[in-house]
C-alpha cells in the first residue's frame, strides 16, 4: 500500500508539471494581452511596453516559466494582475467558499440520492418507485442555473425565506447547495436503485433472508455495502466536479468561488490566477483519484492495490 | 415541547430565516461590477472601482448637476495664467482626512506624483499627461514632477506642457481623487484593498474584492455629516440585482437596458429612472485596411447605416440616433441629418470600383453590452451590397486586436470622462491615439485642429473648431459612423431622495431617506 501511494504521489508530481507547462504555453500562445485589458481606455505602445516590463511579461518565455516554477514550489503563484493580491490567498479564499459549498452539496446529494434510490429499490414497481424515478428524471434534466433562478424566485423573492444572493449568513448556502446538488442527487438515486436491485438478486441476500435476518438489515448491511463500489466511484467524479467550482451558479448567486475566479481570470488573461487555479484543480483531481483508489479496499476487501504483476 | 420550539426558533435565527431588522439609515447599492478588484482609482478604469473611490475620496473640483464645475477641495476655482498653462490653486483649510490628518498641498503633490510614478503602473495617467514633467516621469527620465510647485501648505500651482482649456474638468474626474500621503504610503500595496482613506462623506470600512464595499458616514465631514449612516456597494449578477431590488434588499440598482421593458409598466415603473450617459456608440472605419482606405467606400458605409432603425427596433427607443461624434449636451455637437440612403451607398461603391459590393470583417467582445449591434448592422449593410462578417471573441482577444490597429470596423463605445469635446475627439482620432482604437486615422489637418481646440478657452470660437473636427471625421472623411447616444436606467427606491447621477457616477453626499 505504501509503495502504491508513493508511486501515485510521484505520478502526481509529473502530472502537475505537465499541467503547468501546458497551461503556461496555452496562455502565452492564445491572443490577448493582460496589459491591453488593463488599459482599456487608452494606451500607446510605449505605455503598454512600460507596464509589460514592470510585470516581467517582456522577459523570454522560458525565463518566465522557470520563475513561475521556482516560485510555485514554495506555494507562491505571484500576485493577481488585477486584484493585486497573492494568488494563493485568492485561491484559498475562493476555496473556502467552494469547499464549504462542496461539503453541503455532497451532504445534500448523498442524503437525498441514496435515500431515494434505496427507497425506490425496496419499493420496486410500486408508486413510491415511480414517483422517485420521475423526480430523479426531472432533477437530471433541470440545468443547475435554471434551478438556481427558480429557487431564487420562489424562496427568495416570493416567500422571502432565504437570501437571494451572497453568502453572508448560513441560510444563504441552502439554495446554491440545492441548485448544484439536485442533478447529483438525481443521478445518485438512479445509480443506488440499480445497484441495490442487482445486489438484492444475489445468493448472499437469499442466504441472509433464509437465516432470518430482518429486511432492514438485509438492505442496509448486505445489499447496500455491496452496491457501494459504483456509488463510491461516482462520488469521486462528483467531488472533482464540485471542487472545480460552477461559474453559472456562482454568478447567479453572486458567490466568489473558484469557478468564477478562474473564468474571470481567463477572460482578462490574469495569468498568475489561471496558472494557480489550474495547478489547484489538477491537484484536486489527482488527489481525489488517489483517495478513491485507496478507499475501494474498505468497501470490498477483495480489492487489493498491487503493483505490476511479477513474471 | 417548549424545548423543541425553543430549539427550532434558535435554529431559525441562526439560519437567518427571520426578517433582518435594518437599524439606522443603511443604503444598499447593487449592480454588475465584476471589475471591482480594488478601489484604487489609479489602478483601474471600471465604473465599479471609480464609484467606490468617489464615495471615500474627493477631487479638487466637482461637477454639478447643471454641468458646471465647483470647487471641492479647493477654496475657489483655480486662476489660469494668460498663456493658459499655469493653474494657481488654493486649498480649503478646513478639510481633514478620515485619519485626522489635515489636507495640505503636499498631499496634492503626492497624489499627482503617484499618478506618474512608474511604480504605480497607473492606467489613467493619459488623462492628465499634459501636466509638465508627467510624461518624463512615465518614461523614467525624471523622478520628481516638475509641473507641480508647492507655495505653502494650502497654495500650489500646476503647470502644463501646453495650454489645455478643459484642464479644470480633468481636475474633477474620479481618476483624480486626492490621496493622503502618509496613509497611502503606509498602506503600500494594500491601498485600495485593505485600507483607503479620503476626505469624502463616507469612511472606508471593509472591502471584499468582486463582492462588496462597506462605508460608514464621516461624522466630521466638512460639508456636514451625510444623512445616510452606512453604504453597501454590492457586485451582483444583473438579474439577481433586480430580484434583490424587488425583494426590498437594495435601494439602488444599475440596470442593463435589455431589462428595461419589464419595468416600464407595473409595480416598479415609478422606480425606473432614465438618464443620459454622455456617450457615443459609433462604428469606426479602419483607413489602413482596404477597401476602407478608399473614402468613397467609407462614405458608402455611412450611407448604408440606418441609425433610427437601430434605436427604434434593437434598442426599443432606449437611446438617441446620432450623426455627430460629439454628444448633444457638449459644445461642438452638430445636429446633422442621417446619411442613410442604400441606393446612394450602392452608387458610391460602384463609383469606388466595387459594383458587386464589398466584404467587411467586424470583431466584437462577446461580453460587451452592445455585442448585438454588429448583427443589426449586418442586416442593414446587406441592403447596400456590403457583407459584414461578425466575429465574437473574448474581451482580452478583442482589446489586443483593437490596440494592434487590426480590426477593420470596430465599435467605438465611449462614456465620456468629462463634458468636453476634446474627450470625444482627441482620445480616438489624434494620430498618436488612432491605432489603439483601430481607425488608424493619421491626418495632419485633424491633428492641427485638435491641438488648436485643446489650447483655446471655452467659447464660440472653440466650439466652431470642434464642429470642424466633427465635420471632417463624420461627413468629409467618413472615418467613423456615429450610431447612437446611449442612455442608462436605474431603479431607485421610494425611500431615498437626493441621489445625483452625473452621467457616469452616483453621488450620495446629499442623499437622504424619506421619513
Image (tube, coloured by chain):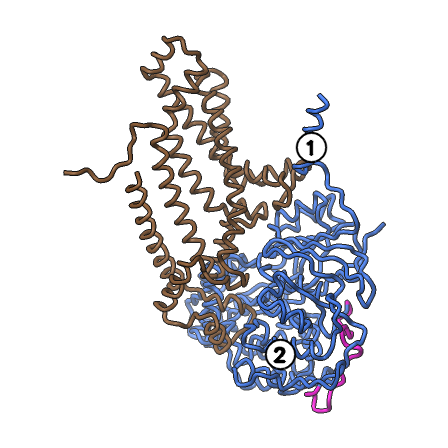
Quadrant placement of the N terminus of chain B: top right
Which residue does the numbered mark 2 point to in the structure image?
B113
Magenta region: which residues?
A: B65-86
Chain ID of residue with mark 1: B
Could you tell me residue B513's position as x and y percent? 81, 53
Report if residue B231 lies within the magenta region: no
Q: Can residue B491 be seen in the rendering of this structure?
A: no
Front of the two marks 1 and 2: 1
Q: Indicate which disc, 1 or 2, sits on the residue closer to the N terminus.
A: 1
Could you tell me residue B24's position as x and y percent? 79, 50
Chain ID of residue with mark 2: B
Asked if residue A191 lies left or right of residue B264, the reply is left
- The colour of chain A is brown
Residue sticking out furthest to the right: B515
Asked whether A36 or B22 is in front, the reply is B22
Asked whether B165 or B358 is in front, the reply is B165
* Disc 2 crowd, CA 10 A, few/some/many (<14, 14-19, 20+): many
Q: Quadrant of residue B130?
A: bottom right
Which residue does the numbered mark 1 point to in the structure image?
B10
Asked if residue B465 lies left or right of residue B100, the reply is left
Chain coloured blue: B
Taken as a whole, is the magenta stretch helix, strand or loop?
A: loop
B458 w.r.t. A108: above or below:
below
Q: At numbered mark 2, what does the secondary structure look like: helix, strand or loop?
A: helix
- Between marks 1 and 2, how big is the CA–CA gap? 56 Å
Task: Name the residue: 42% across, 49% down.
Answer: A281
Task: Name the residue: 73% across, 86% down.
Answer: B151
Amino acid at each position: 500500500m505504501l509503495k502504491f501511494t508513493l508511486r501515485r504521489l510521484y505520478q502526481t508530481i509529473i502530472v502537475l508539471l505537465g499541467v503547468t507547462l501546458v497551461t503556461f504555453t496555452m496562455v502565452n500562445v492564445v491572443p490577448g494581452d493582460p496589459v491591453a485589458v488593463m488599459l482599456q481606455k487608452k494606451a500607446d505602445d510605449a505605455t503598454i511596453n512600460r507596464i509589460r516590463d514592470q510585470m516581467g511579461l517582456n522577459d523570454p518565455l522560458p525565463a518566465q516559466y522557470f520563475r513561475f516554477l521556482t516560485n510555485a514550489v514554495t506555494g507562491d503563484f505571484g500576485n493577481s494582475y488585477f486584484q493585486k493580491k497573492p494568488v494563493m490567498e485568492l485561491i484559498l479564499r475562493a476555496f473556502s467558499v467552494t469547499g464549504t459549498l462542496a461539503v453541503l452539496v455532497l451532504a445534500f446529494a448523498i442524503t437525498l440520492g441514496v435515500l431515494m434510490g434505496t427507497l425506490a429499490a425496496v419499493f420496486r414497481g410500486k408508486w413510491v418507485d415511480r414517483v422517485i424515478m420521475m423526480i430523479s428524471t426531472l432533477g437530471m434534466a433541470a440545468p443547475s442555473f435554471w434551478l438556481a433562478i427558480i429557487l431564487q424566485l420562489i424562496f427568495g423573492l416570493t416567500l422571502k425565506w432565504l437570501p437571494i444572493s451572497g453568502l453572508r449568513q448560513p441560510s444563504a448556502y441552502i439554495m446554491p447547495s440545492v441548485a448544484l446538488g439536485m442533478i447529483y442527487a438525481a443521478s445518485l438515486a438512479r445509480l443506488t436503485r440499480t445497484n441495490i436491485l442487482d445486489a438484492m438478486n444475489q445468493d448472499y441476500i437469499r442466504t441472509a433472508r433464509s437465516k432470518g435476518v430482518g429486511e432492514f438489515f438485509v438492505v442496509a448491511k448486505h445489499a447496500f455495502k455491496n452496491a457501494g463500489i459504483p456509488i463510491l466511484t461516482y462520488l469521486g467524479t462528483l467531488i472533482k466536479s464540485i471542487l472545480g467550482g460552477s461559474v453559472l451558479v456562482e454568478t447567479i448567486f453572486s458567490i466568489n468561488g473558484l469557478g468564477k475566479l478562474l473564468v474571470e481570470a481567463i477572460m482578462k488573461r490574469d495569468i498568475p490566477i489561471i496558472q494557480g487555479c489550474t495547478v489547484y484543480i489538477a491537484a484536486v483531481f489527482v488527489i481525489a483519484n488517489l483517495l478513491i483508489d485507496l478507499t475501494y479496499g474498505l468497501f470490498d476487501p477483495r480489492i487489493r492495490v498491487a503493483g505490476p504483476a511479477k513474471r | 415541547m417548549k424545548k423543541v420550539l425553543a430549539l427550532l426558533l434558535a435554529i431559525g435565527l441562526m439560519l437567518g430565516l427571520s426578517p433582518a431588522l435594518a437599524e439606522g439609515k443603511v443604503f444598499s447599492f447593487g449592480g454588475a461590477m465584476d471589475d471591482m478588484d480594488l478601489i484604487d482609482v489609479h489602478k483601474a478604469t471600471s465604473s465599479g472601482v471609480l464609484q467606490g473611490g468617489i464615495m471615500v475620496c474627493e477631487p479638487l473640483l466637482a461637477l454639478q448637476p447643471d454641468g458646471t464645475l465647483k470647487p471641492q477641495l479647493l477654496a475657489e476655482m483655480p486662476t489660469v495664467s494668460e498663456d493658459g498653462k499655469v493653474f494657481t490653486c488654493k486649498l480649503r483649510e478646513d478639510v481633514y482626512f478620515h485619519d485626522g490628518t489635515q489636507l495640505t498641498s503636499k498631499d496634492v503633490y503626492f497624489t499627482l506624483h503617484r499618478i506618474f510614478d512608474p511604480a504605480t503602473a497607473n492606467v489613467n495617467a493619459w488623462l492628465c499627461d499634459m501636466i509638465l514633467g508627467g510624461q518624463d516621469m512615465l518614461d523614467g527620465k525624471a523622478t520628481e514632477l516638475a509641473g507641480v510647485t508647492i507655495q505653502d501648505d494650502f497654495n500650489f500651482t500646476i503647470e502644463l506642457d501646453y495650454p489645455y482649456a478643459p484642464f479644470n474638468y480633468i481636475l474633477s474626474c474620479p481618476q483624480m481623487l486626492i490621496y493622503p500621503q502618509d496613509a497611502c504610503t503606509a498602506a503600500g500595496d494594500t491601498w485600495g484593498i485593505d485600507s483607503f482613506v479620503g476626505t469624502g462623506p463616507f469612511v472606508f470600512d471593509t472591502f471584499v474584492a468582486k463582492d462588496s464595499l462597506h462605508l460608514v458616514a464621516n461624522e466630521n465631514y466638512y460639508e456636514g455629516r451625510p444623512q445616510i449612516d452606512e453604504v453597501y456597494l454590492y457586485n451582483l449578477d444583473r438579474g439577481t440585482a433586480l430580484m434583490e431590488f424587488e425583494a426590498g434588499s437594495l435601494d439602488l440598482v444599475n440596470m442593463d437596458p435589455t431589462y428595461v421593458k419589464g419595468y416600464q409598466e407595473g409595480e416598479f415603473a415609478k422606480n425606473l429612472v432614465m438618464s443620459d450617459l454622455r456617450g457615443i456608440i459609433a462604428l469606426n472605419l479602419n483607413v489602413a485596411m482596404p477597401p476602407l482606405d478608399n473614402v468613397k467606400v467609407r462614405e458608402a458605409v455611412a450611407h448604408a447605416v440606418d441609425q433610427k432603425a437601430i434605436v427604434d427596433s434593437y434598442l426599443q427607443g432606449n437611446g438617441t440616433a446620432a450623426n455627430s461624434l460629439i454628444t448633444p449636451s457638449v459644445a461642438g455637437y452638430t445636429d446633422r441629418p442621417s446619411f442613410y440612403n442604400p441606393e446612394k451607398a450602392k452608387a458610391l461603391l460602384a463609383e469606388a470600383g466595387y459594383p458587386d459590393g464589398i466584404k467587411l470583417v467586424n470583431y466584437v467582445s462577446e461580453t460587451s453590452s452592445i455585442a448585438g449591434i454588429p448583427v443589426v448592422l449586418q442586416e442593414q449593410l446587406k441592403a447596400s451590397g456590403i457583407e459584414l462578417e461578425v466575429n465574437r471573441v473574448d474581451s482580452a482577444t478583442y482589446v489586443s486586436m483593437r490596440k494592434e490597429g487590426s480590426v477593420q470596423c470596430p465599435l467605438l463605445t465611449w462614456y465620456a470622462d468629462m463634458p468636453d469635446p476634446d474627450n470625444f475627439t482627441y482620445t480616438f482620432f489624434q494620430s498618436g491615439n488612432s491605432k489603439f482604437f483601430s481607425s488608424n486615422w493619421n491626418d495632419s489637418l485633424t491633428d492641427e485642429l485638435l491641438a488648436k481646440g485643446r489650447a483655446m478657452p471655452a467659447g464660440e470660437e472653440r466650439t466652431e473648431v470642434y464642429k470642424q473636427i466633427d465635420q471632417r471625421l463624420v461627413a468629409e472623411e467618413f472615418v467613423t459612423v456615429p450610431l447612437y447616444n446611449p442612455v442608462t436606467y436605474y431603479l431607485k427606491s421610494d425611500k431615498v431622495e437626493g441621489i445625483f447621477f452625473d452621467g457616469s457616477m452616483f453621488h450620495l453626499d446629499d442623499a437622504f431617506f424619506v421619513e
